[in-house]
Image (tube, rainbow, N blue to C red):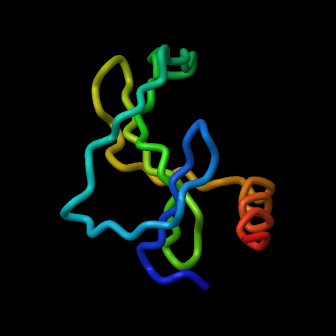
Amino acid sequence: MPPDGFRLALGYHGLRPPQSVPPTQEKPMTTTAPEGHLIPGIGVIETVESDNVLRWDGTNLYVEQDVFHNGQLVHRRYRKRVTKSVAQAIAAILAQH
């Protein structure tokens, strides 16, 4: 099992090696969805910003996101869990190396 703080960065060019970055050195979220989506039930447009870094907390594999409703921050560093099929695909890739 990877140590606490284990991270795996995913980019457009595939996997990069795991990295460990102390929380004090973390950069703010950098990737913004070009447009949001309307949530009709509450009448807001939701947009999300993420640094696209996979994180492992010892139990879950997740990506941190900042969530905005109509441009106002409503969730800071929201942990969106990776689906089981994505986690299995990443595990298969890592097992090959």
Which residue is pictured at 37% across the width and 29% down the height? 68
Eyeballing the image, is 25 above or below 59? above
- Depth check: give the residue in front, 74 or 25: 25
Q: Say whether residue 49 is left or right of residue 27.
A: right
The C terminus: image quadrant = bottom right
The N terminus: image quadrant = bottom right
- Depth check: give the residue in front, 94 or 81: 94
- Depth check: give the residue in front, 29 or 39: 29
- Residue 28, percent from left and from top: 27, 43
- Depth check: give the residue in front, 22 or 76: 22
Q: Say whether residue 87 is left or right of residue 39.
A: right
- Residue 88, percent from left and from top: 79, 63
Quarter of the view holding residue 29: top left
Quarter of the view holding residue 39: top right
Q: How many marks?
A: 0
Which residue is pictured at 52% across the width and 69% down the height? 56
Q: Residue furthest left?
A: 24
Eyeballing the image, is 39 above or below 26? above
Which residue is pictured at 58% across the width and 68% down the height? 60
Eyeballing the image, is 77 above or below 40? below
Quarter of the view holding residue 89: bottom right
Which residue is pictured at 43% across the width and 39% down the height? 50
- Residue 41, percent from left and from top: 56, 21
